[in-house]
């Protein structure tokens, strides 16, 4: 049993193995060509840039880091090894399910925001990704609370208590 629903499990697999179709995988990078990040329009859209380094996503990782610090007491800096490969330090090992959920849902929300800008012509407003993430997390928490036998109740209650 996993804390991730099937759709997020599939997304997680594709992102851990870096097989999501970011533009530098689809096109030859050029200085001003179609490989620029659609969120910031400043850097090439590589996997690491889109999910960790883009100016548009840094505030969301700061928000997630603050939530994690409130729950675990550990200050974890978002890195590819931590947020994508899930190589967690021993001090937070007991919170693995929560960290996998938070990091996967954060990456998924970034991906959805990127696709809304790229394919649907939406604009990214400040706080938009955070609002999308909070909505997704609250939905996930409510979904698990409806299940009376969920083994993740305590984990999700901790998350719910720390969200604003």
Image (cartoon, rainbow, N blue to C red):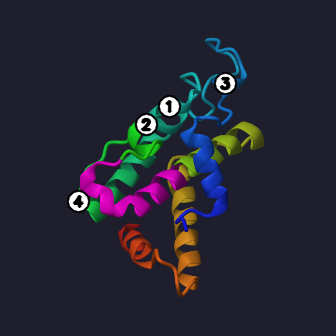
Q: Residues within 10 Å of mark 1 (few under 14, many from 20)?
A: some
Name the residue that disc number 4 marks: 73
Q: Is residue 104 magenta?
A: yes
For the question of whether residue 27 can be seen, the reply is yes
- Is residue 6 covered in magenta? no
Kindly state the secondary structure of the residue where label 3 is placed: helix
Residue 164 in view here: no
Residue located beneath label 3 in the image: 25
x, y percent for residue 133: 53, 57
Q: Residue at x 43, y 40 (%)?
A: 58
Mark 2 or 3, nearer chain start: 3
Q: Are marks 2 and 1 in contact (CB under 8 Å)?
A: yes
| Crowding near the residue tagged with mark 2, few <14, some 14–19, many ≥20 C-alpha atoms within 10 Å | some
CA gap between label 2 and label 1 equals: 7 Å
Q: CB under 8 Å between callouts 1 and 3?
A: no
Disc 2 to disc 4, C-alpha distance: 21 Å
Magenta stretch secondary structure, dominant = helix
* Magenta-drawn segment: 88-106
The residue sitting at 26% across, 52% down in the picture is 90
Q: Quadrant of residue 132?
A: bottom right
């Amino acid at each position: 049993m996993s804390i991730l629903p099937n759709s997020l499990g599939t997304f997680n697999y594709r992102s851990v193995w870096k097989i999501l179709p970011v533009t530098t995988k689809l096109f030859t990078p050029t200085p001003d060509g179609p490989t620029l990040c659609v969120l910031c329009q400043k850097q090439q859209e590589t996997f690491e840039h889109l999910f960790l380094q883009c100016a548009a996503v840094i505030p969301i990782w700061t928000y997630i880091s603050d939530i994690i610090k409130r729950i675990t007491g550990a200050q974890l800096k978002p890195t590819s090894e931590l947020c994508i490969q899930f190589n967690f330090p021993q001090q937070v090992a007991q919170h693995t399910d929560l960290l996998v959920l938070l990091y996967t849902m954060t990456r998924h929300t970034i991906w959805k925001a990127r696709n809304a800008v790229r394919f649907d012509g939406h604009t990214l407003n400040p706080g938009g990704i955070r609002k999308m993430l909070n909505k997704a997390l609250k939905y996930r928490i409510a979904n698990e609370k409806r299940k009376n036998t969920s083994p993740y109740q305590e984990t999700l209650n901790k998350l719910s208590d720390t969200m604003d």
